[in-house]
Amino acid sequence: MIEYLNLLDRVLTKGVPRRGEKPEGTLTVFGEQVQFKFENGFPLITCRDMTGSWEKIITREAPWIISGSTSAKEAEEKFGLTLWKRWAEDSRRKLGTPEGELGPVYGYQLRHWKGHIDQLKETIEMLRRTPETRRAVISLWDLEDVEIGGVKRVNVANCITALHLARINHRTPNGKYEERLDMTMTHRSADLPAGAPHDWAVWGLFQMLVARELGIPPGTLTAHIDDGQIYDMQIEKVKELLKRKPLPRPVVTIEGSPSDINIYDARPEHFKLLNYQHHERLYIPTAL
């Protein structure tokens, strides 16, 4: 996972002090990029053990988002995902949102943008109807649902603000071309040691599921990082990660055929992680 380690090193060496909206200080870069080719493995980092996160968060968050839900209660009851409980409690305390609700976060923007547009369905149909379209963009950000006039409408604003999908011909070793689904994702804000590796894996599963709907393999996942941070309290942990040798990325498969399990039916148990080589677990503190 040399791409990730190189990114962390750039932030440590070139990042500038910045506090942002949280009290914890950071080293920050603005306008970075990291890219993962699926032919070289699934975008799950190997410099620390992510097995627990894969089982408890990643495979559960992707189908929860796709379902269109914004409820931490539903995330736990239907998908076994408990990650969002504390954020829902915080949202209720600060903004008065209903118990268990998060407001217009990822699922809402993906499936109910502006209250009535199913961007996921429209984008898949667009990619089927016009394979070379440049319009297959999904917006996960609506300022009206975030903050207007200094009044916050949502407690946790989406860190991923846009996705762009494209059917692109990739040159194969034999000189021929194979059509694959490429995707870019834009990070408004990225906690690079703790949060971003989860994001790449969650949206990597999303990319695989859309590719299955189209009958083509996933190609490249490119993460555009607007504001990327390493928090001061994470610096020593990052230095430890940078001492670790990169290992080959794992393989992920999705059980069943698209006709049996479509993107809307995917469940955590359908995702299989294979050949995952990794270094030992390393706890990374996060800012609340």
Image (tube, rainbow, N blue to C red):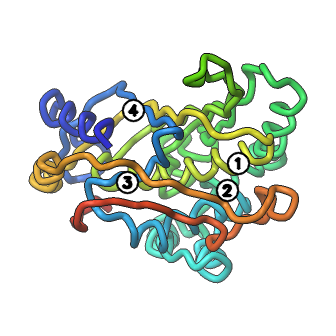
Q: Which mark is residue 78?
A: none
Mark 2 neighbour class, 10 Å CA radius: few under 14, some 14 to 19, many 20 or more: many
- CA gap, disc 2 and disc 3: 18 Å
Mark 1 neighbour class, 10 Å CA radius: few under 14, some 14 to 19, many 20 or more: many
Q: Where is residue 225 in the image (x, y as percent from the top left)?
A: 40, 33
For this orientation, the residue located farthest to the front is 174
Mark 4 neighbour class, 10 Å CA radius: few under 14, some 14 to 19, many 20 or more: few
Q: Name the residue under label 2.
A: 107
Disc nearest the viewer among 2 and 3: 3
Mark 3 or mark 4, which is nearer the start of the sequence? Answer: 4
Q: Which amino acid does label 1 sit on?
A: Leu
Viewed as shown, does residue 15 lie left or right of 44?
left
Q: What residue type is labelled 4?
A: Val
Image quadrant containing the N terminus: top left
Mark 3 or mark 2, which is nearer the start of the sequence? Answer: 2
Q: Mark 4 points at which residue?
A: 34
Q: Mark 1 points at which residue?
A: 110
Q: Is mark 3 on a helix, strand or loop?
A: loop
- Circles 1 and 2 in contact, beta carbons < 8 Å: yes
Q: What residue type is labelled 2?
A: Gly
Q: What residue type is labelled 3?
A: Gly
Q: Is mark 2 on a helix, strand or loop?
A: helix
- Circles 4 and 3 in contact, beta carbons < 8 Å: no
Q: Is mark 1 on a helix, strand or loop?
A: helix
Residue 129, placed above or below residue 246: above
- CA gap, disc 4 and disc 3: 14 Å
Viewed as shown, does residue 197 lie left or right of 256?
left
